[in-house]
Every structure is written in structure tokens, then in C-alpha cells.
Amino acid sequence: MSDSLRFPPPDLDMSKPTVARAYDALLGGKDNFDPDRELAAAVEEINPGTTALAHENRGFLARGVEYATRELGIGQFLDLGSGLPTVENTHQVAQRTSPDNRVVYVDIDPMVLAHARALMVENDTTTVITADVRDVGAVMNDAGARRLLNTDEPVCLMLVSLLHCFPDEEEPFDLVRRYLEPFPSGSALVYSHLCSDDAAHARTFTQRVHSSGTPWGRVRNPQECEAAVAGMELVSPSVDGAEPARLVDCDTWRMPGADPVDVPDKRIWEHA
Ligand code: SAM
């Protein structure tokens, strides 16, 4: 049996947490172990409401995919740092609009591929690649990506709750440009990033994640998070398009009935 078909995957390390599994624990999933649950509980204790943030971020992701398919007519998605399969995954939302919509998931955590295979997520229109997204060449040259992504058509690039996993010296925002480069104008980015304007609180949160031993970056302030989309045309965050285009708390972005506010009533939020 090939290693990619084994479960649990042979390279699974259960001794320390991973971001994918700790995030799954925050979402109430079952694909996590004690160290992951400990990290999830610790960040919830440091920042009450972190669990809610994870759920809010998933809602934002679904609304972003919905917007890209229905409003922009985009039919292909490159979901980087996609996470463990949960509810309303990118392919489910995108393929509700059209079953022909294509989705390429990429995640470094081997559990993501194992679970996607178990759930039969992989098919003619959807693939899962186990790779480090920082290796852009490896992702774009992967057979699955080459099969499903057409660089002559606009793509929806998804960097949802991912770029805070990388420290500044790795220049995480450069990934936006490098991934979008081969695709034509009309492409879109669905983006969220853990954000705070309380530097001391952001540092405490960041230090706790670092102390768990999982590779991570940091919570950034609004101006830093906005650097990722510099030069891009932003979408109004309100459903009626009346609000000026800008990044907002992910929970208010195109959320029916929500009022996108300038400063979220949270010490940490997902800037989206
Ligand atoms: N995008 C999903 C969402 O918003 O619901 C999952 C977000 S989760 C907080 C971050 C994901 O990024 C995890 O699944 C983690 O394994 C993945 N990740 C972190 N570093 C990565 C890397 N270098 N390459 C690929 N995936 C990575």
C-alpha cells in the first residue's frame, strides 16, 4: 500500500500540536489529539473568543467562495493552507454553483490528505496536495494542480487564516503576488489574517503558540495585515455595496444584517 493511502499517515507526530489539528479542535472536530486540544484550550484562555473566531472564519470562507463563484463567475479555486475537511469546505460551496467548478487544496499537514481521501473529496474536479505552500514551484507543478488549474482563466486564490503562520523574515505576503502572477486579471483573493491593535496581547498570544513547538508566525496589526492586498481592488464589505471597500472583521464581511465596523469589538479578530 502506498504511504499516501495509509491511515494514520506514517509521518504523523502526535507528540506536539499542529496548527491544522488545533484549529480542528477549536471547530469542535474529532481529528485532533491531546497536545492539539491543550493548545486550543490555551489560546481560548489567553484570548476568550478564539473558538468563536475559528467558526466566524469558516463562515467568512464560505461567503468568500460564494461571492467568487456567483458574483465574479470564477470557476477555479486554489485553497492554500486549506485545513482538515470540515463543514462547508471550498469545493462544496463552489460546486453548489456549478459542479464543474474546480478546487485544488494544499496543506502541509498529512492528516488533511488522509481525511480528504477517507471522505472521498478527491474526484475529477477536486484534488488535495500535501505540500509546503512556500514552495510555489512544487505546488504549481504538482500533477493535480496542472490538471485542474488553467492559467488562462481567472483563479480565486484562498489564503484564509494562513499567512499568520509565517514569520516576517519569510516574507509571507510575497506569496500573494507569486501565486497570482501566472493568472489573468479578474482573478480574486479570499484573505483573512489574525489581527490585533493591542500589541502586548498579540505578543502573548503569539508566544503561547510558539511555546507549543508548532511552526508559526505572529498576530499582526491592521496596517500589517493590509500590506498583503496593497495595490488590489478591494470589495465593499457590505452586502449592498454601500460601505467603502476595505478590510474588516471577517464576521462582518458580506454578512447579511451585519454592520462592518471600523474597529471590531475584539482584542483579536480575523482581518478579512
Ligand atoms: N484555511 C482554513 C480555514 O481558514 O478554515 C484552515 C486555516 S488553519 C488556521 C491554517 C492551515 O494552514 C492549517 O491547516 C495548516 O496545516 C496550514 N499550513 C500552515 N503552514 C503551512 C505551510 N507552510 N504549507 C501548507 N499549509 C500550511
Image: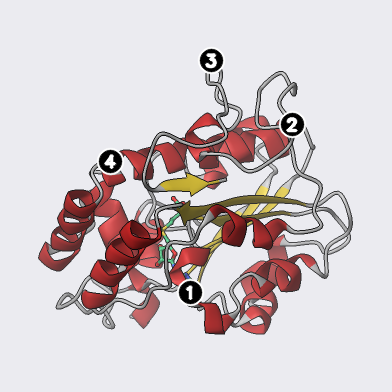
Q: Amino acid at mark 1?
A: Phe
Q: Nearer the viewer, residue 231 or 54?
A: 231
Q: Residues within 10 Å of mark 1 (few under 14, many from 20)?
A: some
Q: Position of residue 102 (x, y in %)?
A: 67, 51
Q: What is the C-alpha distance between the residues marked 2 and 3?
A: 17 Å
Could you say whether the residue bearing mark 1 is in a helix, strand or loop? loop
For marks 3 and 4 on the same chain, the one whose residue lies earlier in the sequence: 4
Which residue in the structure is indicated by mark 3?
Answer: 257
Which residue is the extreme one toward the left? Answer: 34
Could you say whether the residue bearing mark 2 is in a helix, strand or loop? loop
Which residue in the structure is indicated by mark 2?
Answer: 244
Q: Residue at x 61, y 57 (%)?
A: 223
Q: Is mark 1 within 8 Å of ligand 1?
A: yes
Does the CB distance between marks 1 and 3 fall below 8 Å?
no
Q: Amino acid at mark 2?
A: Pro
Which residue in the structure is indicated by mark 1?
Answer: 166
Q: Position of residue 204 (x, y in %)?
A: 27, 64
Does the CB distance between marks 2 and 3 fall below 8 Å?
no
Instruction: Name the side, left or right, on which 73 lies relative to 219.
Output: right
Q: What is the C-alpha distance between the residues marked 3 and 4?
A: 21 Å
Please identify the quarter of the rendering in which residue 171 is found: bottom right
Q: Residue at x 86, y 49 (%)?
A: 186
